[in-house]
Amino acid sequence: MTQSALLEQIKSKKSFLCIGLDVDQDLIPLDLKVEQDALFTFCKRIIEATAPYCVAYKPNIAFFEAYGLEGWRSLEKVMNFLNQQYPEIFTIADAKRADIGNTSKHYAKAYFEQFEFDSVTISPYMGKDSVEPFLEYKEKHAILLALTSNEGSSDFQFINTDGKLLYEQVIERSKSWQNADRLMYVVGATKAHALQKIRTLIPDSFLLIPGLGVQGGSLEEVAVNGLNHECGLLVNSSRGIIYASSESDFDKVAGSVAKDLQKQMAFYLRQKGII
């Protein structure tokens, strides 16, 4: 998917909501657990209920691969459903991959060709030759971990070298890589205070912002500090939407929560003059 197509959807839906599909069989409603493919059925119902209000879905690969071959088959069915029924919606493989160049080429082939994702999250630790294979695909995107929302992010990301924090150096260095215009960046919602500085480094790039809801991130802080002139944000909520109810009406409740977030996002988009 091109960035312009994503922007068109943001304006059309008045939303920059991404929904994380972190599907745990222990948390899905009891009546679904008897289904032959409970993971897929749960995702399908969540997608059908929330698609009018979001512009992206982010299957968390760990939640599928934890169930072995059956989990991978469920993921394939989810992606086939999304690409056939909602081709306009941006898809993110939350896989956090990257390795030596030849291995990264195969990771890219798996997610971009086999599963047909639009993007994949990438760890930058091994440097440009581990990331550039993902950037060889036209209309595909690599979403680089920059500043994450987890507690341990301070272990490395805030190391100060010559007056610059490590995550800032990652962002700056990545801009020189081949096809860097296909890069997006992960910035945790709980680190919204850093968004103003990050926007001076990458004013036009899309930022994937996890950590809304259960992790305590503030949509207002993210929008005020992170929106650029075109939007440039994908704000993710996972558990706060898909597990908003554990009853048989889980999909309707998820749709209601997603609709409420969409309305809030529309307010910030209008405030910024984007819609």
Image (cartoon, rainbow, N blue to C red):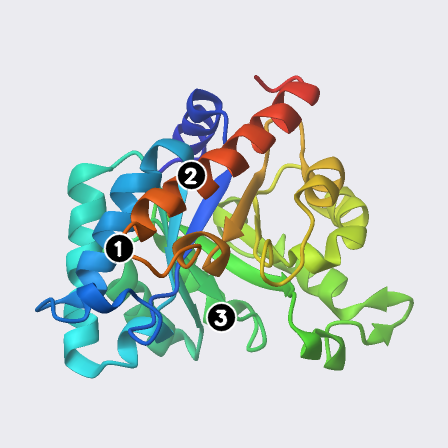
Residue 149 visible in rendering: yes
Question: Within the image, what quadrant is residue 214 found in?
Answer: bottom right
Nearer the N terminus, badge 3 or badge 1? 3
- 68 above or below 248? below
Amino acid type at mark 2? Ser
Q: Secondary structure at mark 1?
A: loop
Residue 89 placement, left or right of 35: right
Nearer the N terminus, badge 2 or badge 3? 3
Question: Residue 248 got which mark?
Answer: 1
Question: Residue 256 got which mark?
Answer: 2
Alpha-carbon span between mark 2 and mark 3 = 43 Å
Alpha-carbon span between mark 3 and mark 1 = 47 Å
Judge the density around disc 3: few (<14), some (14-19), many (≥20) Cα neighbours within 10 Å: some
Q: Secondary structure at mark 3?
A: helix
Of the pair 266 and 164, the residue shown nearer to us: 266
Residue positioned most to the right: 163
What residue is drawn where x is 24% and y is 49%?
A: 45
Residue to which mark 3 is pinned: 129
Q: Are marks 2 and 3 in contact (CB under 8 Å)?
A: no
Nearer the N terminus, badge 1 or badge 2? 1
Judge the density around disc 2: few (<14), some (14-19), many (≥20) Cα neighbours within 10 Å: some
What residue is drawn where x is 70% and y is 59%?
A: 190
Of the pair 128 and 17, the residue shown nearer to us: 17
Question: Within the image, what quadrant is residue 154 found in?
Answer: bottom right
In the rendered image, residue 219, in percent from the top left (x then y), is placed at 66, 43
Residue 35 placement, left or right of 125: left
In the rendered image, residue 11, in percent from the top left (x then y), is placed at 48, 22
